[in-house]
């Protein structure tokens, strides 16, 4: 009897852990996946728009400089115009004092809070993570980010959500301190694409994937050239070997 109870308990443990971890992530295909995959520049630009207008109010991207936006297809004039919308602290000046000035393309994207304590104070004690490497840092990568953004919903009747937390079907434990960041039409896309929640989640996920690995396309191109070189070199050596040993046969 004890063995039967123990076996039942052991079977229930993985089920309980699975429920605590959240539901299976939405399984999507992304244009930059695979050996020949590449980033969708239009999606990256829309994703930056979502990041700038929605995510950047709480989350930093400390490794993102304005000049890096050339990688999503923006030209120098567009990058300069975006940078000019922000001010950064510079100095010291001739008097030894710090001062504010309009940002330049060489500057990094300003953080929303001056320090960690200010960030926690503005978010009920929760610290919004930096998004520079968030896609690489989370298990599930792009699927995790997308699922999290579209997973906010009303909790089941038997689930009590504490004040300051929200129910997300894909988040481990289902309770998250971040309020639903996206709502229908909250961003007006410059290219006229309808700003639905799934569309915005897809676009900003692709932007964050690019932010986590901006040199992905270059790496793939170098890898392809290397493979072609190895194949050509293999063919040359094989032909040389056939010619060298032909007389001995």
Image (cartoon, rainbow, N blue to C red):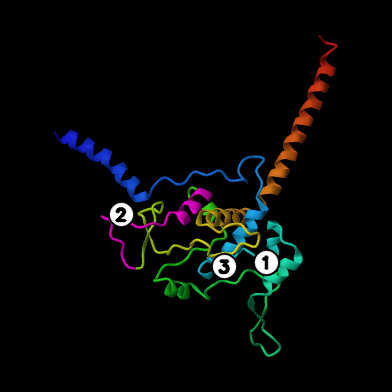
Which residue is denoted by mark 3 in the rendering?
Answer: 53
Spatial distance from mark 3 to mark 1, Cα to Cα?
A: 15 Å
What element does badge 3 sit on? helix
Q: Which residue is mark 2?
A: 156
Q: Are marks 3 and 1 in contact (CB under 8 Å)?
A: no
Which residue lies most toward the left here?
1
- Measured in 3D between alpha carbons, the distance from the residue under mark 1 to the one under mark 2, in whole angstroms, is 43 Å
Q: Magenta span covers which residues? A: 141-163
Q: Is residue 110 magenta?
A: no
Q: How busy is the neighbourhood of tag 3: few (under 14 within 10 Å), some, or many (20 plus)?
A: few
Mark 1, secondary structure of its residue: helix
Query: How crowded is the residue under tag 2: few (<14 C-alpha within 10 Å), some, or many (20+)?
Result: few
Task: Say left or right for 36 vs 203.
Answer: right
At x 27% / y 38%, what residue is drawn?
A: 11
Task: Out of 150 and 107, give the one closest to the viewer.
Answer: 150
Q: Nearer the viewer, mark 3 or mark 1?
A: 3
User: Which of pointers 3 and 1 lies earlier in the amino acid sequence?
Assistant: 3
Q: Residues within 10 Å of mark 1 (few under 14, many from 20)?
A: many
Q: Which mark is residue 66?
A: 1
- For the residues carrying marks 1 and 2, which lies nearer the camera in this image? 2
Indicate the position of residue 202 as horizontal and vertical percent values. Answer: 55, 53
Determine whether label 1 and label 2 are within 8 Å by CB: no
Pointer 1 or 2: first along the chain? 1
């Amino acid at each position: 009897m004890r063995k039967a109870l123990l076996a039942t308990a052991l079977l229930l443990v993985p089920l309980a852990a699975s429920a605590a971890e959240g539901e299976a992530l939405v399984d999507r295909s992304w244009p930059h996946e695979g050996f020949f995959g590449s980033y969708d520049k239009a999606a990256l630009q829309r994703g930056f728009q979502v990041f700038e207008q929605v995510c950047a109010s709480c989350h930093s991207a400390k490794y993102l400089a304005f000049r890096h936006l050339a990688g999503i297809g923006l030209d120098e004039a567009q990058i300069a115009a975006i940078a000019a919308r922000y001010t950064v602290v510079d100095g010291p000046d001739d008097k030894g004092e710090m001062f504010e000035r309009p940002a330049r393309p060489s500057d990094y994207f300003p953080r929303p809070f001056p320090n960690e304590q200010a960030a926690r104070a503005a978010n009920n004690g929760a610290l919004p993570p930096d998004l520079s490497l968030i896609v690489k840092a989370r298990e599930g990568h792009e699927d995790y980010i997308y699922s999290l953004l579209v997973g906010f919903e009303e909790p089941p009747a038997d689930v009590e959500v504490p004040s300051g937390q929200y129910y997300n079907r894909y988040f481990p434990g289902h309770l998250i301190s971040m309020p639903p960041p996206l709502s229908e039409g909250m961003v007006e896309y410059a290219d006229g694409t309808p700003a639905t929640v799934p569309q915005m989640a897809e676009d900003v996920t692709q932007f964050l994937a690019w932010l986590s690995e901006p040199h992905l396309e270059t790496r793939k191109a170098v890898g392809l050239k290397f493979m072609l070189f190895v194949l050509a070199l293999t063919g040359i050596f094989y032909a040389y070997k056939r010619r060298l040993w032909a007389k001995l046969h």
